[in-house]
Image (tube, coloured by chain):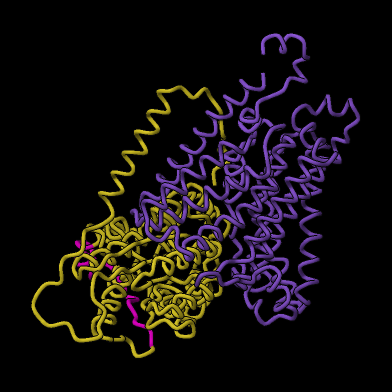
Chain colours: A yellow, B purple
């Protein structure tokens, strides 16, 4: 949150108005260019079975990621890649605020989307909107968070990783690495899934302390982690729940002159490099590319072939541990935004 | 005409009806809203469908309630940066009392209204007592409430959200008042839209037809002169801060009953959208000029744009750019008309 937002009124010259208009026009053109590929005509032979819906499938992907978050960008890439390959039109939208996210679901219902993919960081807030989508006959796949409520709301399947299980895995791995006191850094105040990760780590590890930071302010993240390390010298491991925060934590550990090891959830190119160079102990990868790719595939199969995947159980995309032993293989894929 | 103008005092001069319309602060925003409406109606298929209309009205409604309250405050010459977080604080108070202490929802709502009014009065009292800009004072309240929200929520529930409102006593009746829905043309309309319209109507009446309304314009336009002619400046401004807090309570109540859960970090950053909506609606940042209808229309522009962009299926990466450009366009239209209005008035 920046505090120096100011609104200033100044003389609005004609030139400025013209420039604004030009900017608007340019933005519109960009939009037209960026909407994604046109659907490929259904290729191959094969007669369409009677009764099956035909035409272009439109899938709305609605996440709770903040714009610019590298994690959700990979999900988006996955969904769009599946869309390109299968001839499905994918509309990706995101809102971190649960009420706004519920409205995006309503919006997709109003648009009569052919399928909805939604991440449920706050299932209660999305309940009515998701139910309305299901009642309107739109198949829903939940992703990432909200696994425990997915079936209750009528979703055909859930694709994600169990946050608690992943947290336990992190705790175990840290314990095996001989660590004794862990700092767990929570970067979004309202996200229940992040708390479950720290809880999981606590369950498997024991001594885990939580630290609350605001991901939109990296300077603050770094100085708070540094502060926590300075206050408690016995902390010998920092567990972050996001790659951007991991980079901040690595700097903070260095600045504090601490010998704590840093481990993180989720991958990006920086994390890969840091693992390669030994600055990060390991990363738990939930392979979120699949959380974008698979739901689009599932919805396409559901429409064209009435397939459901998982048999009422969630489809797990993680956790996979990425450490020095396998970092080179994974690293080559992270650079292009698919891991 | 020229002869008449010479003999009549300029304060009594008759203005043409068109000019009288043009000097209204909300006119620019109305034209902006029409432009946005026409644009998305043409560009997208679903914007005008019942489902589409219900979506953007819903988005505008809670924003609109806050924008109208903030507009009154801005006409009175002050800002409230704590308004966004306050919507979460009031929701959390209601939800914690109802789910953790098993209070009846109505009593919980009443308690959170009292809480809101106290914080609002504190904001107003601090601003008036210290003479500090309200920007700074309410920034402090904003940060304090943000910490309080998270701290208390984690302390009481052990998680970062309070849920389980659906199974509390009195949920059905309170939910009916604050969060019921109406089916029109196959689409679900939220009752918050009615609250928005009602709140706007009351605020407009207050601003234009009552003594308090005159006081609000007076304290915002020239506080010293207002005090000298006997306007109770402190009381008026404190009342305005309390109104904003009460509006935040209304929105918090609507949200907590509709979504049956509150997240500790909800509402952060929303305060700027309220101010922007009020400014689009013709409020001056310097106070003394503005309108409640305008702010409501400003919120409508926001809601239509936010949902319209989604309907248009434009790439989400550029969302904020579209939003910014469209809002800028709306403000430019507004500005052009205000300049004309100022010329007419002279």
Residue A97 visible in this rendered orientation of the protein? yes
Where are the magenta residues, as a range?
A313-333
Look at 69% across and 50% down and name the residue there: B200
**Membership of B315 in magenta stretch:** no
Q: Quadrant of residue A35?
A: bottom left
Look at 31% across and 48% down and name the residue there: A31
Q: Position of residue B214 (x, y in %)?
A: 81, 35
Look at 77% across and 20% down and name the residue there: B12
Residue closest to the eye, B187 or A32: B187
Residue closest to the eye, B301 or A161: B301
Q: Is residue A120 left or right of residue A303?
A: right
Q: Is residue B193 above or below residue A14?
A: below
Quadrant of the rendering where the C terminus of chain B is positioned: top right
State the residue lying farthest toward the right: B230
Q: Quadrant of residue B290?
A: top right
Count of picture labels:
0
Q: Is residue A261 left or right of residue B114?
A: left
Q: Position of residue A116 (x, y in %)?
A: 38, 72
Q: Position of residue A6 (x, y in %)?
A: 57, 35
Quadrant of the rendering where the N terminus of chain B is positioned: top right
State the residue lying farthest toward the bottom: A311
Q: Position of residue A331 (x, y in %)?
A: 23, 62
Q: Is residue A155 above or below residue B254?
A: below
Q: Quadrant of residue B166?
A: bottom right
State the residue lying farthest toward the left: A45
**Membership of A316 in magenta stretch:** yes
Residue closest to the eye, B236 or A252: B236
Q: Is residue B114 left or right of residue B181?
A: right
């Amino acid at each position: 949150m920046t505090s120096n937002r100011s609104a200033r009124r100044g003389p609005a010259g004609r030139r400025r108005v013209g420039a604004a208009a030009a900017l608007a026009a340019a933005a519109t053109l960009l939009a037209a260019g960026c909407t994604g590929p046109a659907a490929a005509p259904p290729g191959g032979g094969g007669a369409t079975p009677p009764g099956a819906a035909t035409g272009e499938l439109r899938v709305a992907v609605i996440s709770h990621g903040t714009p610019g978050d590298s994690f959700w960008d990979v999900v988006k890439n996955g969904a769009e890649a599946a869309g390109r390959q299968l001839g499905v039109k994918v509309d990706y939208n995101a809102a971190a605020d649960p009420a706004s996210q519920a409205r995006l679901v309503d919006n997709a219902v109003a648009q009569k989307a052919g399928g909805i993919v939604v991440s449920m960081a706050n299932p209660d807030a999305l309940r009515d909107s998701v139910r309305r989508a299901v009642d309107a006959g739109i198949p829903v796949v939940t992703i990432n968070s909200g696994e425990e409520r997915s079936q209750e709301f009528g979703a055909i399947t859930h694709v994600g990783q169990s946050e608690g299980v992943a947290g336990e895995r992190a705790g175990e791995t840290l314990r095996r690495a001989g660590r004794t006191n862990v700092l767990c850094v929570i970067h979004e105040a309202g996200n229940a899934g992040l708390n479950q990760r720290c809880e999981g780590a606590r369950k498997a590890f024991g001594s885990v302390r939580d630290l609350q930071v605001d991901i939109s302010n990296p300077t603050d993240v770094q100085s708070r982690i540094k502060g926590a390390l300075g206050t408690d010298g016995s902390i010998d491991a920092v567990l972050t729940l996001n790659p951007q925060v991991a980079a901040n934590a690595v700097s903070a550990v260095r600045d504090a002159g601490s010998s704590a090891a840093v481990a993180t959830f989720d991958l990006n190119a920086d994390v890969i490099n840091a693992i390669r160079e030994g600055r990060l102990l390991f990363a738990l990868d939930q392979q979120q590319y699949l959380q974008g790719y698979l739901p689009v595939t599932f919805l396409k199969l559901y429409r064209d072939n009435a397939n459901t995947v998982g048999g009422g159980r969630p489809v797990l995309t993680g956790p996979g541990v990425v450490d020095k032993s396998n970092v080179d293989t994974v690293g080559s894929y992270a650079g292009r935004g698919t891991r | 005409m020229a002869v008449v103008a010479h003999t009549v005092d300029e304060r009594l001069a008759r203005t043409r009806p068109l000019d009288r319309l043009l000097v209204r602060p909300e006119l620019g925003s109305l034209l902006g809203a029409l432009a946005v409406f026409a644009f998305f109606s043409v560009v997208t298929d679903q914007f005008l469908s019942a489902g589409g209309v219900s979506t953007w009205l819903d988005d505008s409604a809670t924003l609109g309630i806050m924008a109208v309250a903030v507009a009154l405050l801005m006409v009175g010459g002050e800002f409230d940066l704590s308004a966004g977080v306050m919507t979460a604080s009031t929701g959390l108070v209601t939800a914690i009392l109802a789910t953790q202490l098993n209070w009846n929802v109505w009593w919980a709502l009443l308690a959170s209204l009292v809480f809101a009014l106290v914080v609002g009065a504190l904001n107003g009292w601090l601003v008036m007592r210290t003479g500090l800009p309200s920007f700074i004072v309410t920034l402090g309240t904003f940060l304090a409430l943000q910490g309080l929200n998270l701290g208390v929520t984690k302390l009481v529930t052990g998680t970062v959200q309070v849920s389980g409102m659906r199974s509390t006593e009195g949920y059905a009746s309170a939910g009916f008042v604050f969060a019921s829905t109406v089916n029109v043309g196959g689409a679900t309309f939220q009752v918050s839209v009615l609250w928005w319209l009602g709140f706007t109507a009351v605020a407009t009446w207050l601003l234009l037809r009552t003594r308090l309304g005159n006081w609000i314009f007076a304290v915002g336009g020239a506080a010293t002169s207002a005090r000298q002619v006997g306007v109770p400046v402190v009381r008026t401004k404190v009342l305005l801060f309390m109104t904003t807090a009460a509006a935040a309570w209304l929105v918090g109540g609507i949200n907590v009953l509709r979504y049956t859960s509150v997240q500790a970090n909800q509402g952060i950053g929303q305060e700027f959208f309220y101010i922007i909506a009020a400014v689009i609606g013709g409020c001056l940042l310097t106070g003394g000029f503005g309108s409640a209808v305008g702010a409501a229309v400003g919120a409508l522009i926001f809601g239509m744009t936010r949902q319209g962009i989604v309907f248009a299926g434009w790439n989400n990466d550029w969302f904020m750019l579209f939003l910014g450009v469209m809002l800028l366009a709306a403000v430019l239209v507004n500005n052009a008309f205000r300049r004309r209005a100022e010329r007419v008035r002279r």
